Amino acid sequence: MWVLLLGALCLGAVMAALGMFSKAQVKTLKQLGIWVGAIGGLLLAALMLFTGRGATALWMLVMLGPLVWSWVVERRPPGIGGFGGMGGGAVPPPRGAMSRAEALEVLGLKAGASAAEVKAAHRRLMQGAHPDHGGSDWLAARINQARDVLLG
């Protein structure tokens, strides 16, 4: 009986984890993968050290450490850490005046859209494109410019 209860508890935990995984943002999943890989590598090196394979563990850290570090630094967005300064990456200047048709296309609206529709489309698109949520500075600037053209 207790085996069934333990199995149901494990199944519930797996289902909850999958639910959280499906709602997580890509940026968060990438960070989780980096942390799991780093901790797993350190645990493997510690296990090898404790089982008398210290030379192999040291070789593994020396040879693979810089490779893993280069992957982490290579995938880091511009403006985060290093000597790139504080804050996010620079937003490129707009290409010039955006036409009303182009603004409608950026927001995915049809001609004659109301101000409420423009605001709703802007809010919906910015939820995924905002730089604070792993989106692009350039795309967020384009969405804001489209909103300003249609509402201004």
Image (cartoon, rainbow, N blue to C red):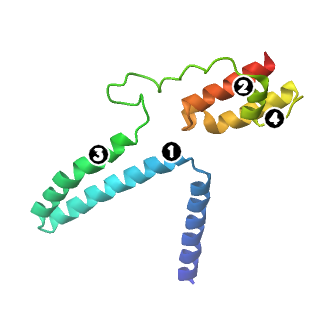
Mark 4 or mark 1: which comes first in sequence? 1
Amino acid type, label 2: Ala
The one nearer the camera, 113 or 98, is 98
Marker disc for residue 27: 1
* 3D distance between C-alphas at marks 2 and 1: 26 Å
Marker disc for residue 42: none
Amino acid type, label 1: Lys
* Label 2, residues with CA under 10 Å away: few <14, some 14-19, many ≥20: many
Task: Report the residue at 78% width, 30% height from top.
Answer: 104
The residue at the far top in this view is 152
Mark 2 or mark 1: which comes first in sequence? 1
Mark 4 or mark 2: which comes first in sequence? 4
* 3D distance between C-alphas at marks 3 and 1: 18 Å
Q: Which residue is mark 4?
A: 109
Marker disc for residue 69: 3
Instruction: Determine the secondary structure under disc 3.
Output: helix
Mark nearer the viewer, 2 or 1: 2
Name the side, left or right, on which 12 lies relative to 45: right
Q: Which residue is mark 2?
A: 146
* Residue 84 vertical placement versus 32 (above, below): above
* Residue 74 vertical placement versus 36 (above, below): above
| Percent position of residue 57, x then y | 16, 60
